[in-house]
Image: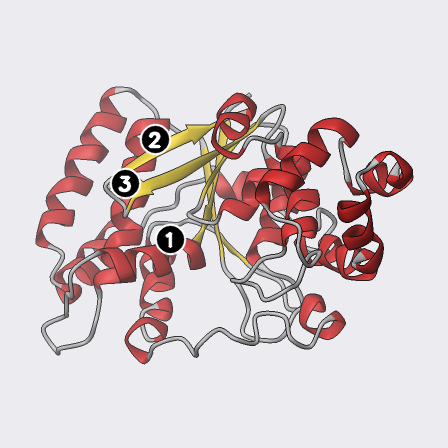
Amino acid sequence: MGKLILIDGNAILHRAFHALPPLTTKRGEPINAVYGLISMLLRVIQDLKPTHIAVVFDEKEPTFRHKEFAQYQAQRPAMADELSGQFEKAKKVLEAFGIPIYSKVGFEADDVIGTLAGDARQDVVIVTGDKDILQLVGGRVKVYLPIVGLSSAKLMGEEEVKEKLGIAPKQVADYKALVGDPSDNYPGVAGIGPKTAISLLEKYKNLDGIYAHLEEISPLVREKLTKGKDDAKLSLRLATIVKDVPVKFDIEACGRWDIDSQAVLNLFSKFGFKTLTERVKKVGKNLDDEKQMPLL
């Protein structure tokens, strides 16, 4: 059957940029986020032993969420120039590795990942630092979630998500609809905190179930839910990852591994990735020994 790895390029680059010490090329250009992404890629190849890999990025244009809610992510500061300049460099390295890159204007990387994971016939592991994607966990789909910076990660199945969040993966969007999300700047229901949200979801399963049983809920909480119903419904739409993005998925390309070894080595030399050069050769030897796939 095989195993498909879907890497959230934006999430891992952001995490690497903030987690790793400053690193520059010979020309003084910031490069630490690219280093972190490729380092994570090599770890994933070695530890998870995929047969197929793709990387997904956001587009710069507004998404359907911004069009529905003008304040969506409005409080976020502009991306630092030191980070934004690394995206094209990262894509060049991925292209040299022969790894397909996916994105779709009008949607977030999460939505593209949700769509690709749903279309895949293989087992799927999503590599991301974004906990929103935990709502996709279930069946053949797991999430490989960095724990401390990029130094360690945990493979999250349904039980691990329930242990970490106190709710099932399929309840993540409903939970966020109740408590809101300061990072994405949508409101949820005013006055409903995590404990109350988890308690409501334990009893009524999802947002529709909660609103279908308002008469059973304590007057104080019922009043908050009644007043915040429109915000809850809006927040649910914003929190839910779309799984039908119109993107053409070529699974064969994800497993082809047409690696341009010289291009990879040239980029590593240009970026000053001496330790990564040795790592990629070591990982490549291991893969060759295991007859998994060629790497340099």
Left or right: 174, with 10 as reference point: right
Residue at figure coordinates x 22%, y 66% from the top left: 31
For the residue marked with disc 3, what is the amino acid?
Leu
Q: Position of residue 260 (x, y in %)?
A: 30, 52
Residue that label 3 marks: 42
Q: Position of residue 92 (x, y in %)?
A: 34, 63
Query: Is 91 in front, or is 175?
Result: 175
The Cα atoms of the two marked residues, 2 and 3, are separated by 13 Å
Nearest to the eye among marks 2 and 1: give it: 1
Residue 79 in view of the camera: yes
Assign the C terminus to one quadrant of the image. top left
- Circle 3 packing at 10 Å, graded few (<14), some (14-19), many (20+), is some
Whether pointer 2 and pointer 3 mark residues with C-beta atoms closer than 8 Å, the reply is: no
Residue that label 1 marks: 12
Residue 248 in view of the camera: no
Task: Tell me if residue 224 comes above or below residue 114 in the rendering.
Answer: below
Residue that label 2 marks: 293
For the residue marked with disc 2, what is the amino acid?
Met
Q: Disc 3 on helix, strand or loop?
A: helix
For the residue marked with disc 1, what is the amino acid?
Ile
Label tally: 3
Looking at marks 3 and 1 on the same chain, the residue that comes earlier in the sequence is marked by 1
Looking at marks 2 and 3 on the same chain, the residue that comes earlier in the sequence is marked by 3
Looking at marks 2 and 1 on the same chain, the residue that comes earlier in the sequence is marked by 1
The Cα atoms of the two marked residues, 3 and 1, are separated by 13 Å
Q: Position of residue 178 (x, y in %)?
A: 69, 49
